[in-house]
Each structure stands twice: as structure tokens, then as C-alpha cells.
Image: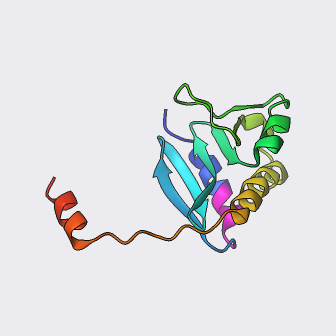
């Protein structure tokens, strides 16, 4: 199942003025990064949100929220939010702000520049 493109459009409307927000395809969906750190994303019909582990533990007690586990190993500090909890713009903005706020507390990741050798060998595959 592809990821929810309606959710993608809504995220882009809310985040259009956020400095440093980047979109990247990952885990069969879309991930959004700020300063190189993942803050939220989309997996199928789920909104994925990164946050402090203690806040994630609290949010997991809410009905439409579950652990981010797509590989059999749950990720601490990440939750999957079902559609019923992000359909309204105000709810979605609240979830996105949690992820954005957390990512802004993390140190910036520098973009790795690929060497000509790496590019050459990658393109030859």
C-alpha cells in the first residue's frame, strides 16, 4: 500500500514556512527532516512522529496512537498516529509541532559530501 498523499499535501501546507524542512523517501513512505534530523513522516495511512521518549510513553496511552514498529523492533521516542487523530488541520499541526520541536533540540547533522570516487562507483552499478 502506498503512503497517504493527502496527508503529504496537508503536511506541506502546514510546514511550508518552516526553515530547514526537507522531505525524503524512506521506509516505503516519506520522512521529513529538520537540520538533518527526522521529525515526522508518513507510513501508509499513519503519521509517524518523533518525540522525547517520556512524551511518547504518555502519547501511547491515547487510543489512536501506537508504537512505531514496522520491522518487529519498536523505536523508542517514535509513535504511529492513526488517521482519526490527524484528520483535522489543528490536530495535525499539533502533532507536527511535537516532532518539529523535538528535532530542533537535536544537534544539526552536516550533509555528507560524496567523493568523486563514491559517485563514480555508485553510477557504475
Figure quadrant of residue 84:
top right
Toward the front, the furthest residue is: 107
Q: Residue at x 55, y 30 (%)?
A: 70
Of 8 and 94, the residue lying toward us: 94
Residue 38 is situated, as x and y percent measured from the top left of the image, at: 60, 55
Of 7 and 96, the residue lying toward us: 96
Q: Which residues are magenta?
A: 11-17
Figure quadrant of residue 97:
bottom right
Residue 101 is situated, as x and y percent measured from the top left of the image, at: 76, 61
Q: Is residue 42 left or right of residue 54?
A: left
Give the colour scheme shown. rainbow
Residue 52 covered by magenta stretch: no
Q: Is residue 38 left or right of residue 111?
A: right
Residue 16 covered by magenta stretch: yes
Q: Main secondary structure of the magenta part?
A: helix
Toward the top, the furthest residue is: 72
Q: Residue at x 47, y 41 (%)?
A: 28
Residue 69 is situated, as x and y percent measured from the top left of the image, at: 60, 30
Q: Residue at x 66, y 69 (%)?
A: 16
Of 61 and 30, the residue lying toward us: 61
Vertical position of residue 15 compared to residue 71: above or below = below
Vertical position of residue 108 compared to residue 76: above or below = below
Q: Residue at x 57, y 39 (%)?
A: 43
Vertical position of residue 3 compared to residue 19: above or below = above
Toward the left, the furthest residue is: 124
Q: How many marks?
A: 0
Amino acid at each position: 500500500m502506498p503512503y497517504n498523499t493527502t496527508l503529504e499535501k496537508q503536511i506541506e501546507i502546514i510546514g511550508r514556512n518552516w526553515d530547514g524542512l526537507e522531505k525524503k523517501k524512506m521506509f516505503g513512505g516519506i520522512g521529513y527532516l529538520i537540520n538533518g534530523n527526522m521529525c515526522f513522516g508518513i507510513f501508509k495511512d499513519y503519521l509517524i512522529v518523533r518525540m522525547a521518549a517520556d512524551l511518547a510513553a504518555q502519547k501511547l496511552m491515547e487510543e489512536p496512537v501506537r508504537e512505531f514498529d514496522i520491522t518487529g523492533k519498536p523505536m523508542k521516542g517514535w509513535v504511529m498516529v492513526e488517521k482519526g487523530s490527524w484528520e483535522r488541520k489543528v490536530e495535525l499541526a499539533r502533532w507536527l509541532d511535537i516532532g518539529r520541536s523535538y528535532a530542533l533540540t537535536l544537534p544539526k547533522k552536516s550533509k555528507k559530501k560524496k567523493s568523486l570516487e563514491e559517485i563514480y562507483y555508485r553510477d557504475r552499478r
